[in-house]
Image (spheres, grey):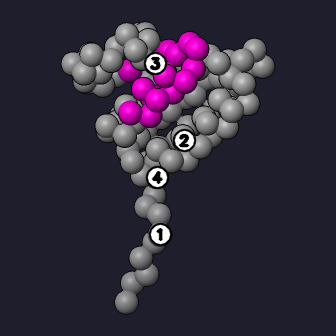
């Protein structure tokens, strides 16, 4: 019998960088779905708990994001004093605008 892996290979990469001025930049690349949300959410929650109040999320290299990703961004935007979703790809931008979340997520190009 073949061994079943506990975790699928994640198709996402991300980096969380704090600049020391209550600001963090999260850079996400690849595919962000429910299989990759938890590790990302944990790291960002750690910086928010550490006093970060301004959060920039660069999604320019995201190829796919499902509703769990968008829900996570809405959660962060509700917690951070300032939130910016930077460079969403065209399809993701259209979905966010259609959902009426472009202002909430502070989308920039």
Label 3 sits on a secondary structure element that is: strand
Badge 4 density bin: few <14, some 14–19, many ≥20, Cα 10 Å: few
Q: Quadrant of residue 44?
A: top right
Q: Residue at x 38, y 33 (%)?
A: 71
Marks 3 and 1 sit apart, C-alpha to C-alpha, by: 32 Å
What numbered label is drawn on residue 40? 2
Q: Quadrant of residue 51?
A: top right
Q: Which residues are magenta?
A: 71-88
Left or right position of 67 against 49: left
What numbered label is drawn on residue 56? none
Left or right position of 50 against 83: right
What numbered label is drawn on residue 6? 1
Badge 2 density bin: few <14, some 14–19, many ≥20, Cα 10 Å: some
- In percent of width and height, residue 80 lies at 57, 20
Badge 1 density bin: few <14, some 14–19, many ≥20, Cα 10 Å: few
Marks 3 and 2 sit apart, C-alpha to C-alpha, by: 15 Å
- Which of labels 3 and 4 is toward the front? 3
- Which of labels 4 and 2 is toward the front? 2
Marks 1 and 4 sit apart, C-alpha to C-alpha, by: 12 Å
- Which of labels 1 and 4 is toward the front? 1
> Is residue 35 inside the magenta stretch?
no
Q: Earlier in the sequence, mark 1 or mark 2?
A: 1
Label 4 sits on a secondary structure element that is: loop
Q: Residue at x 31, y 37 (%)?
A: 67
Q: Is residue 33 visible?
A: yes
> Is residue 84 inside the magenta stretch?
yes
Marks 1 and 2 sit apart, C-alpha to C-alpha, by: 18 Å
Q: Which residue is mark 4?
A: 10
Q: Residue at x 21, y 18 (%)?
A: 98
Residue 49 in the image: above or below residue 81: below
Left or right position of 54 against 78: right
């Amino acid at each position: 019998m073949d061994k079943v892996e506990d975790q699928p290979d994640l198709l996402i990469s991300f980096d969380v960088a704090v600049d020391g001025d209550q600001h963090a930049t999260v850079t996400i690349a690849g595919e962000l779905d429910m299989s990759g949300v938890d590790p990302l959410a944990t790291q960002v929650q750690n910086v928010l708990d550490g006093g970060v109040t301004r959060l920039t999320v660069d999604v320019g290299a995201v190829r796919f994001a499902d509703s769990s990703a968008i829900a996570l961004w809405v959660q962060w935007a509700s917690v951070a004093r300032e939130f910016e979703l930077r460079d969403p790809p065209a399809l993701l931008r259209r979905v966010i605008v259609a959902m009426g979340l472009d202002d909430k997520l502070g989308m920039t190009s």
